[in-house]
Amino acid sequence: MAQSIPSLNPTPTAKPITKTSLLPSFTTKIHLSKNKKMNCLSTSNTRTTTTISSLNQNPSLNLLSNRRQDVVEAIESSLSNCLSETNLHQTVPCLKSKIRGKVRDIYDSGDYLVMVTTDRQSAFDRVLASIPFKGQVLNETSLWWFDKTQHITPNAVVSSPDKNVTIAKKCSVFPVEFVVRGFVTGSTDTSLWTVYKNGVRNYCGNALPEGMVKNEKLSANILTPTTKAVDHDVPVTPDE
C-alpha cells in the first residue's frame, strides 16, 4: 500500500451534499504507489454513494498535534520516492487521454475526470522539483475547501479514492483565476509588489496610492483576476 502522512482534514460538517451515481469501473478503487513508475489500478463495478464530507473522516488537528515525529519520519524515508509521473491511460482502457499540467495529471473518462495531484513542485510557471507528500497535502487541502464552500456553490467533486486523487464531473471551465490580495507582497511577475515597484498604480482596476512598501497591509482586500493562459497567467481588468 502506498505510504501516506496523517490526514489533516477535519471531521465531517453537517448536512453534506450527497451524490449517488454509477461511477466508471475505475473510480471505486484506485491505488497509487509512490515509485518512479506507476503501480497498478484495480477495478470494481459498484454503485457507490459518496459525499464530499465523507472524504474527510479523519482525526482532528488536536488529535494529530503529537504526530510530528511520525510525519517527519515518513517524509525522510520518502525523499527519493515521490509521485512525479503517472501514466494511467496506458493501463486503464476507459481513460481516453492524459493532460499533463504543471502539478496535476488529468485523465478523461468521458463524463468524469480523474485528477492525480502529483508531488511536482511548480513555481514561476515551471516545475522545479518533487517533494514527498506534497500532492497529498495539496489534494486534501482542495477537498477541505470544497467541503467548506459547498453551501455557497455546487462543485464537481464526486469522490477521492486515493489521497492524491480526485474524481470530478466534467465541467466547462471558466478560465479565470480570482486572486484576493491583502498585502503588497510577492515575487512573481503578476504579484502585487512586483507590478507596484515597476510603477503600476492601477492594477486590475484597483487604484494603488503612492509610497507603499513591500509587505504593507492594504486598507481593504482587492481582487486581481488573471486568465489561465497555457504558459503564463495574464492579469485582466474588470471590463475585460
Image (cartoon, helix red, strand yellow):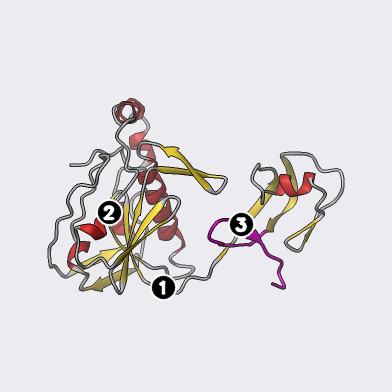
Q: Nearer the viewer, residue 203 or 85?
A: 85
Q: Position of residue 70 (x, y in %)?
A: 30, 28
Q: Main secondary structure of the magenta part?
A: loop
- Please give the name of the residue rendered at 38% of the width and 39% of the height, measured from the top-left corner: 61
Residue type, label 2: Asn
Q: Position of residue 220 (x, y in %)?
A: 73, 54
Q: Is residue 9 left or right of residue 232?
A: left
Mark 1 — residue?
171
What mark, if any, has residue 87 been given in the picture?
2
Q: Of the two numbered discs 2 and 3 on the same chain, state the one appearing first in sequence.
A: 2
Q: Of the two numbered discs 3 and 1 on the same chain, state the one appearing first in sequence.
A: 1
Q: Position of residue 75 (x, y in %)?
A: 34, 30
Q: Is residue 120 above or below residue 45?
A: above
Residues rendered magenta in the picture: 224-240
Q: In 3D space, how far apart are the residues under numbered discs 2 and 1 (Cα atoms)?
A: 23 Å
* Viewer-side label of 2, 1: 2
* Viewer-side label of 2, 3: 2
Residue type, label 1: Cys
- Please give the name of the residue rendered at 29% of the width and 71% of the height, measured from the top-left corner: 19
Q: Position of residue 147 (x, y in %)?
A: 40, 59
Residue type, label 3: Val
> Marks 1 and 3: in contact by CB < 8 Å?
no
Quarter of the image for residue 172 reads: bottom left
Mark 3 — residue?
179
Q: Secondary structure at mark 3?
A: loop
- Please give the name of the residue rendered at 22% of the width and 63% of the height, measured from the top-left corner: 27
Q: Secondary structure at mark 1?
A: loop
What mark, if any, has residue 75 been given in the picture?
none
Q: In 3D space, how far apart are the residues under numbered discs 3 and 1 (Cα atoms)?
A: 21 Å
